Amino acid sequence: MTNDIFIGGGGVAYGEAQLLLLDKSNRHGLIAGATGTGKTVTLQIMAEGFSNAGVPVFLSDVKGDLSGLAVSGTETFKLHEPFMKRAETIGLDLQYDSFPVTFWDLFGQQGHPIRATVAEMGPLLLSRLMELTDVQEGVLNVAFRVADEQGLPLLDLKDLQALLVWVGQNAADLSLRYGNVAASSVGAIQRQLLVLENQGGTALFGEPALELSDLMRVRADGKGEINILAADQLMGSPRLYATFLLWLLSELFEELPEVGNPDKPKLVFFFDEAHLLFDGAPKALVNKVEQVARLIRSKGVGVYFVTQNPGDVPDDVLGQLGNRVQHALRAFTARDRKELKTAAETYRDNPTFDTAEAIQQVGTGEAVTSFLDKKGIPQVVQRTLIRPPSSQLGPIDKPTRDAIMASSDMAGKYDVTLDRISASEMLAKRADAAAQEAEAAEAAEDAAEAKEREYKKARRYDGGGTTSRSTSRRSSKDDGFGGALAKVVMKELKGTTGRRIVRGILGGLFKGR
């Protein structure tokens, strides 16, 4: 097994062979060029080279063409003769071959489902995904903090939606501790979650979540697994596409151990349509990409950005991309000429030709290239004839894809969605318990009020425990002439005449004694 990947070159017109050294390939790279100039083929031959070297690969298939990696090229292919002629020109013994491929798809249609939990995605990437304002992002951070403190697992979108409802209901108490939590901000986040859900974002979040080790497998024959993410449908939601790939890079950065400078990468990651990652991205997100790109190489991961123009990548990130393949750029406008000049200035000059002119002149399947040498120094730019691929050029048919998926090691592991107890169920249980407690308290209050009403009815009990008739009822029955006469007599007895009569009677009694 060699310690490099043959990219192309050779022959009188193209100079010496261009080799990508395996022990320098984790220092990242760039594949750039206008549409139709051969970027996809370059990506394909790089993936083949890494797989042959026992290095797993993850790439996104935006147009569906890269699925051909799974089957061998054939002599019946219409470009067989041109391929053989090119191979002879650059000194390549072209052998057709297939490569181990696992198909993935966020929507579970053209590959095995690939998911992440809401907690793994985190508030920064979710804010980017939903285009939240700074204030709304702050509220989302509060929600994540509450989930951590109260042990509420955030697995899927319904968990986050339920948590935000709880945050809105307790906004006053949370504001005292974390700052203002406005109901309007909570509502805005809920609306963005609804938009994300309508765009198919529900499929991304949930369990079983992707295990990174499943992307880093090496087959028994020594070939690295090529993981292909079906992105043709995903490109309909470009922000979802970019956020997912950035999350994957971040997870690799967080979980993989330091390996220093390995003889070959542990994984190579190709980010197609890389401009989607940076278009309109906030400064915090660009800083995160720069940090990941700078440090993830020490984890043994190489990142290759694939885009139309080097200017699509921020300078701080572009400066870290040591291995470069530049396909043709066109300069029809003043802006195009400026970008062409900028692209040419990023290479070490070759005294034999003008780099800017060469970038305009190279045809399909040609490029100007510069790779790191054994000391890690970029070599001078060279015009290069890119080698033809060993696998099929172009997509495979659906029956072939289905057969590969059915025989995959991943078949059945991620295909069925799990829905274990998480934040939404726990909060619902709390709400039910609170409702039952409130109902019990209301019933106790009603019972107390009923008892109070009974007491006020003046129900009395005699010594034997039997209920006696009330005085009010008895007095009502005694009303009449006799009752009225008794009242007059009692009134007179209470008066002066009454007291005299009583004294006279008592005086006579005592005098007689």
Image (tube, grey):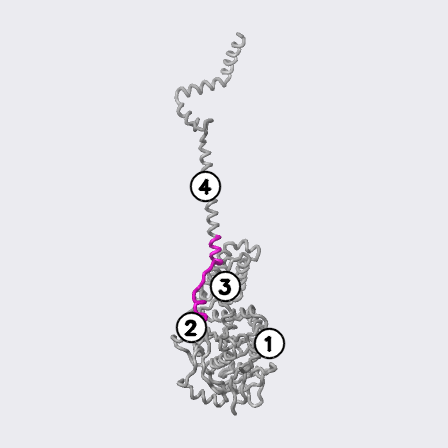
Query: Where's the C terminus, which quadrant?
Result: top right
Between marks 4 and 2 in the image, the one whose residue lies nearer the viewer: 2
Asked if labels 2 and 4 touch by Cβ distance under 8 angstroms, the answer is no
Asked if labels 1 and 2 touch by Cβ distance under 8 angstroms, the answer is no
Q: Secondary structure at mark 1?
A: loop
Residue at image mark 2: 407
Q: CA distance from mark 3 to mark 2?
A: 30 Å
* Range of magenta residues: 404-430
Between marks 4 and 3 in the image, the one whose residue lies nearer the viewer: 3
Q: Is residue 309 magenta?
A: no
Residue at image mark 3: 118
Q: Earlier in the sequence, mark 3 or mark 2?
A: 3
Q: Secondary structure at mark 3?
A: helix
Residue at image mark 4: 446
Asked if labels 2 and 3 touch by Cβ distance under 8 angstroms, the answer is no
Name the residue type under label 4: Asp
Would residue 323 be visible to someone looking at this image?
yes
Name the residue type under label 3: Val
Q: CA distance from mark 1 to mark 3?
A: 33 Å
Q: Quadrant of residue 264?
A: bottom right
Asked if labels 3 and 4 touch by Cβ distance under 8 angstroms, the answer is no
Between marks 3 and 2 in the image, the one whose residue lies nearer the viewer: 2
Between marks 4 and 1 in the image, the one whose residue lies nearer the viewer: 1
